[in-house]
Amino acid sequence: MPSGLETCLPTISNKGELLSDVASDFAAGPEKPASYMGKVTALLYARYCAGEKPLAMVSTDNCSHNGDKLYAAVAAFARAWVENRKADAGFQKYIDSEKVSFPWSMIDKITPRPDVSVEKILREDGIEGLEPVITSKNTYVAPFVNAEETEYLVIEDNFPNGRPRLEDGGILFTDRATVDKVEKMKVCTCLNPLHTCLAIFGCLLGYKKISDEMQDPELVALVERVGYQEGLPVVVNPGILNPREFIDTVLRIRVANPFMPDTPQRIATDTSQKLAIRFGETIKAYQADENLSVENLRMIPLVFAGWMRYLMAVDDSGRAFELSPDPLLDRLCPQMAKLKLGDAEAEEIIKPIMQNASIFGVNLYEAGIAEKVCGYFVELNAGEGAVRRTLKKYLTNK
């Protein structure tokens, strides 16, 4: 089961160019590939050469429609090798035949960076040799893993060569459409939006651990209202997992776990790339449902306003902090720098951001919530302590 960003982004750099190892593998063929995906495709080519044996190529990458992304990567290598006469022409047909499948899967298990608090507990138990190794890419590798107990693995049941009874171990097998529903349930309603709420306001309020935020009554009320009140009315129940029970587990067990030292700063990474999926899809669903009104959304606009307040890189105590990496910071920060803490006239400055449908999934003006977002922003930006006062105003005993 291949896993990692190599599958989600298998061949292209962030500059739109072939990765050097991939380009070399395209030219050299399957004999001694250097890239991760080249090695995966070479193994599949060996299976083809051994008699076109059937096989399911199951990606467990944490990205939507991961089977399609894995297929695209493998097909790119196969096409290059055939064109360069490094592989038999039949290899491409084999990949596209019913003998090889690329099932979709949805995997959900929070496994943050190895944490010193967990290392300390293990050391006190007499375990030695726990020092983590930091790679050149700033990846942490350690002899221990701090990961949550809760885990989900849902796989499209498409195995041309059969499979073991992995459902006996808790894996959920279903059809492709249901995998997609589970993915959307998680990403658009029941987990990822709640994480983003905690990330944004956690950074503004000076939190260093997500679990600590779950002791904050206003933040708990915020994620409960975003999940239960605003998200659940439009979530599509996939049948194999109950959305309300999923949120129950997220809020009561998962993000509240003190042994899961995840940080709001980590989760705030790339927020501009996440808002459209994590919240924009809910807004679109409200717009499409004649029984619902976007005007009834209160907390999602507050989160949008909170994110723009976060972009000012000044916390609720008036202290500057470092924003998490995000590809749009170079564009957004100069715009937000036109504001200072306490400015009451903000709409003309934040208007271009609120109009950007690629960020929010919708143009906030066209969706009819820009005025509400702007009003929240002015309150959040009213001065030191304004973030806390605003949260108390809208979330205490509500």
Image (spheres, rainbow, N blue to C red):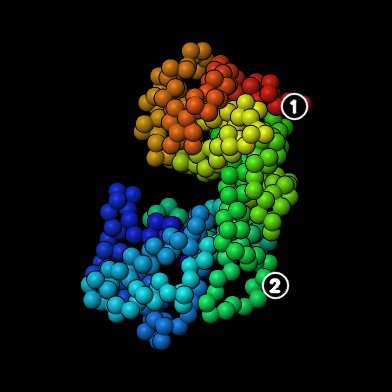
Looking at the image, residue 337 lies above or below residue 21: above
Question: Is 90 situated left or right of 364 in this image?
Answer: left
Look at 61% across and 54% down and name the residue there. 182
Left or right of residue 306, residue 313 in this image:
left
Disc 2 packing (10 Å; few <14; some 14–19; many ≥20): few
Look at 54% across and 20% down and name the residue there: 371
Look at label 2 and name its amino acid.
Asp
Q: Residue furthest front?
A: 290
Q: Is residue 48 visible?
A: yes
State whether residue 297 is above or below residue 89.
above
User: Residue beneath label 2, please?
Assistant: 168
Q: Pick out the residue farthest to the bottom.
A: 51
Along the polypeptide, which appears first: circle 2 or circle 1? 2
Q: CA distance from mark 2 to mark 1?
A: 43 Å
User: Residue 16, image x and y in percent?
Assistant: 29, 51
The quarter of the displayed image where residue 256 is located: top right
Depth check, front residue: 257 or 80: 80
Q: Position of residue 258 (x, y in %)?
A: 68, 47
In the picture, the quarter occupied by the C terminus is top right
Q: Position of residue 89 (x, y in %)?
A: 29, 77
**Residue 317 seen:** no
The residue identified by callout 1 is 398
Q: Secondary structure at mark 2?
A: helix
Q: Looking at this view, is 199 or 277 the one in front?
A: 277
